[in-house]
Image (cartoon, coloured by chain):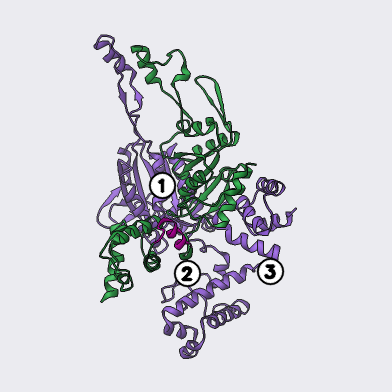
Amino acid sequence: MFSDFFYSLREQGVPVTPTSFLTLHKALNSGLIENLDDFYIAARSILVKSERYFDQYDQVFTSHFEGTPLPEKDGLILDEIASQMLRQWLQNPGATARMLGEDEEHLQKLSRTELLAYFKQILQVQKDEHHGGSKWIGTGGTSPLGHSGYHPSPMRVEGESSAKTALRVAAERRYRDYSTQGPLTRARIGEALKRLRKLVPAGAKDRINIEKTIYRTVKIGGEIDIVFEPRLQDRLKVVLAIDNGGWSMDPHVKIVQTLFDYAGTQFKDIKTYFFHNTIYDTLWQDAGRSKKPFSIADFSRFDPETRLIIVGDASMAPYELGSQDGSIHIQERSGRTSIECLKYLAETFPHSAWLNPLQENMWDYSQTVGMVRQIFSMFELSLDGLEKAISQLKA
Amino acid sequence: MNDNIADFSGGRTYVLDNELARIVHISMALEMPLLLKGEPGTGKTMLAHAIAENLNMELIVLNVKSSMKLIDALYQYDTLTRLNDSRFGDSNRDVSNINEYIRMGKIGQAFSAAQRVVLLIDEIDKADTDFQDDMLDILDQMQFDIIETDITVQAKVRPVIIITSNAKKDLSDPFLGRCNFHHIAFPDPKMMRQIIAVHFPGLDENLAQGAIATFYKLRDVEGIEKRPATRELINWLRALASDPDFKTDRLVEEEVPYLGVLFKKSPDYKKAASIYSQARK
């Protein structure tokens, strides 16, 4: 019964398991479910385990039981872009109208619903008849949706030189979930710290020091005197190296820094360094990377138990890693390749992790990410990735 | 199935929406733990209290802490008391009987209770993943062993288990697989009016309406780090109601007294206060 429903949920990307489906049948057989309303609620609470999928569940449910067609994925994205355009328009009607090449007054007359429909229509044209950047959505233009335009875009579209349209990029859905479930935002820092806390086992005075207990007991003539001591506290030292050069890292530096500032209380010792793209002989203690150089050779004096965390997108030209004078900053060129420097770091600090703000499915597009991954274990800078990194660092 | 399950409709100070009531009902009938998520202040914890009150069951609360080990929730073997007893011999306990020194933890208490109880496992997300998964094993099998005495503690009656989580992150798949799930959305103004009515019977209608309207407006102030929740609203209403000088129309005039009851973080407080002082100018 309802196996179609089950499979269309799966098709729509709701992770439902056979076990939970069986549970649902148990509920059906036990006479708990009397009508469709009951079924809706019961099936949702049994099958769907995260509020993230509630929306999809609703769609599948209505389609299955009321015959409403499932929205096309493309359509959904169009809707989303159109509503972003509407927001843009409401904030700044003049600029938006200019960009669209439309008469502002004409647009003013339209109601919001009409506007939305109008925007969708433009987008539809864009989708069907795109000829390589001449339309108003593209990269390098002035539209609110493209990349490198003058407008502070509500949706950043990546792609330095690629001729992808905003629409295409949106359809790939790479940044769709950026704010809700992707990498860390400020609000998630507290959550992230919970993961970091795992590095530091709490130390209560709950362990008996047997030697001291015996000593004290003997000392006072056999009267048992138990001596407690806290468990050994593992207050870790952490070295944090952040790639703060280049536009690709700009959006992330602050988040990363705040994250580790908060972490300062957790760790006995946290040192932050900066680099651009990759590490050569020197790291910088100042964010401007000019005043306080720090030679990585000095790391050999550090406690090898120190955890090294590198944050960077590891995306650059391959010669920056492999060539002897690969650095784009001339003062950093010393004859050692960056690969060697990175290997040296990995050897100096056996507990290390590389956090990458790029989403994991993007890593394969960059050759240098692969090269770096051969040296460091790389994790996505998201809650999941951070958790994995922490468990690696704990070991 | 127990008859009184069907009667559950919310406690004296808990307003239950129909949907949630059915989910509680189904979870109890299927004997599965119910996992509740939702932003703070949506009444996740209160639900367990309400169920317990409504069904006349005892409520056992396990407040999960990050340092907690599963064994703490099951039982404790009090070696120290036993040692002291053996030294001084001044207690009524029988030192040779280990069982005298085994104390049940919260889960242990729930299992050994003679009647069906409500077991609330609060803020499960604080513990690490191993804790969560191991705990679910125990709750699945409804039994655990006391290693010291080699006794198996088996649940006499399956407790009603409510688990709450604040985390935005999902719990592990095996964990989720064994629970029913519900996400409690923040109540809408209409629902909030009912909640207020339950807490303040006979509250002045104008005051309630005005306060709720202001409350939702304040919740929407941009850039607020900790948005005020139901608990804050109730405390705030209590403050307003107890202030003899306060008149409801002051709310309409965009004046909000006792902002500190609603906003607990100083940047939030300043932000909210500045918005209202601007509005008055």
The reply to whether dot 1 and dot 3 touch (C-beta < 8 Å) is no
Instruction: Pinpoint the chain carrying mark 1.
Output: A
Tell me the magenta residue range.
B191-202
Tell me where residue A297 appears, x and y as whole percent: 32, 43
In this view of the protein, which residue sits in the foreground, A229 or B88?
B88
In terms of sequence position, does the residue under pointer 2 or pointer 3 come before the other?
3
Residue wearing tag 1: A342
* Residue at horizontal 72 percent and vertical 47 percent from the top: A29
Q: Taken as a whole, is the magenta stretch helix, strand or loop? A: helix
Specify the amino acid type for callout 3: Pro
Which colour denotes chain B? green
Residue wearing tag 2: A155
Give me the C-alpha separation between circle 1 and circle 3: 54 Å
Question: Which disc, if any, is residue A69?
Answer: 3
Instruction: Pinpoint the chain carrying mark 2.
Output: A
In this view of the protein, which residue sits in the foreground, B88 or A82?
B88
> Who's purple, chain-wise?
A
Tell me where residue B165 appears, x and y as whole percent: 48, 48
In the image, A217: left or right of A71? left
Question: Which disc, if any, is residue B70?
Answer: none
